[in-house]
Image (cartoon, rainbow, N blue to C red):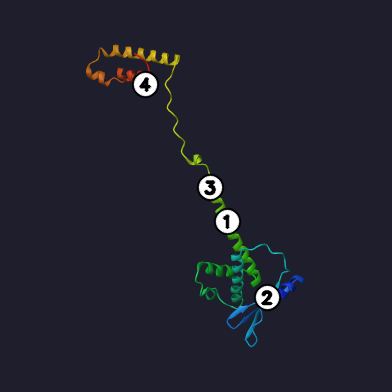
């Protein structure tokens, strides 16, 4: 659309509570302004536009999707089927846009606004996911690392160690007396042997 016609049109929309939006079919293309002089044209639809309201900032990608959605809506209003509108769709984004337009209700302007909102929701969702990723990576490494094994218990010391060592020596003496009357095989099969006590004495730092 030429700037000379766009500016007066915007001023008129701000001045009036509502205005009619007309869509023209000029040859095989659809547009929102009259066909060129001498070109065969047809008025496809005329819809009441809501009063102009301040617009929130829209992502440029979503603006382009909204404009393209409006053209797809014109095709639908002219009787084009979903399969017909899908023809020439050379990307997944284009096919999804056509599918979204045909799943929505409303005139071309309403479709444009709905597609822009849908696009902005998807942009916000992607931005939210990107912002959440660094937070997850910033967690302290200690939180995910397995805890170190607890250090082994230290041998008893002081009076407690002396008492324990005395008990072990007494047990060793008793085992020595018991083993004196046993044969070699019986000594081997005994549940508790002097060497077991000697090992414990060494572990607890007991002197013999």
Closer mark to the observer between disc 1 and disc 2: 2
70 or 130, nearer to the observer: 130
Q: Which mark is residue 107?
A: none
CB under 8 Å between callouts 4 and 2?
Answer: no
In terms of image quadrants, where is residue 125? Answer: bottom right
**Residue under circle 4?**
203
Left or right relative to 5: residue 85: left
Q: Secondary structure at mark 3?
A: helix
Q: Mark 4 vs mark 2: which is more N-terminal?
A: 2
Residue lying furthest bottom: 38
Q: Secondary structure at mark 2?
A: helix
**Residue under circle 1?**
127
Q: Secondary structure at mark 4?
A: helix
**Residue under circle 2?**
3
Closer mark to the observer between disc 4 and disc 2: 2
Residue 30 in the image, given as x and y percentages of width and height: 61, 78
Report if residue 107 is visible in the image. Answer: no
Report if residue 141 is visible in the image. Answer: yes
Q: Residue at x 62, y 81 (%)?
A: 25
CB under 8 Å between callouts 1 and 3?
Answer: no
Residue lying furthest front: 4
Residue 103 in the image, given as x and y percentages of width and height: 58, 68
């Amino acid at each position: 659309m030429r700037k000379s016609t766009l500016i007066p049109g915007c001023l008129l929309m701000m001045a009036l509570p509502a205005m009619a939006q007309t869509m023209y079919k000029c040859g095989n293309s659809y547009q929102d302004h009259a066909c060129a002089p001498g070109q065969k044209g047809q008025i496809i639809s005329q819809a009441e536009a809501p009063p102009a309201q301040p617009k929130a900032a829209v992502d440029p990608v979503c603006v382009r999707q909204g404009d393209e959605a409006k053209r797809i809506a014109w095709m639908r209003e002219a009787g084009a089927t979903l399969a017909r509108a899908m023809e020439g769709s050379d990307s997944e984004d284009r096919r999804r846009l056509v599918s979204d337009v045909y799943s929505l209700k409303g005139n071309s302007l309403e479709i444009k606004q709905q597609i822009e909102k849908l696009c902005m929701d998807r942009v916000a969702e992607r931005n939210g996911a990107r912002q959440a990723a660094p937070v997850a990576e910033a967690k302290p490494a200690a939180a995910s690392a397995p805890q170190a094994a607890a250090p082994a218990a230290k041998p008893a010391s002081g009076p407690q160690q002396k008492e324990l060592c005395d008990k072990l020596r007494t047990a060793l003496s008793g085992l020595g007396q018991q083993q004196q009357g046993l044969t070699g095989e019986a000594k081997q099969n005994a549940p508790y042997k002097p060497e077991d006590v000697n090992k414990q004495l060494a572990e607890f730092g007991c002197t013999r």
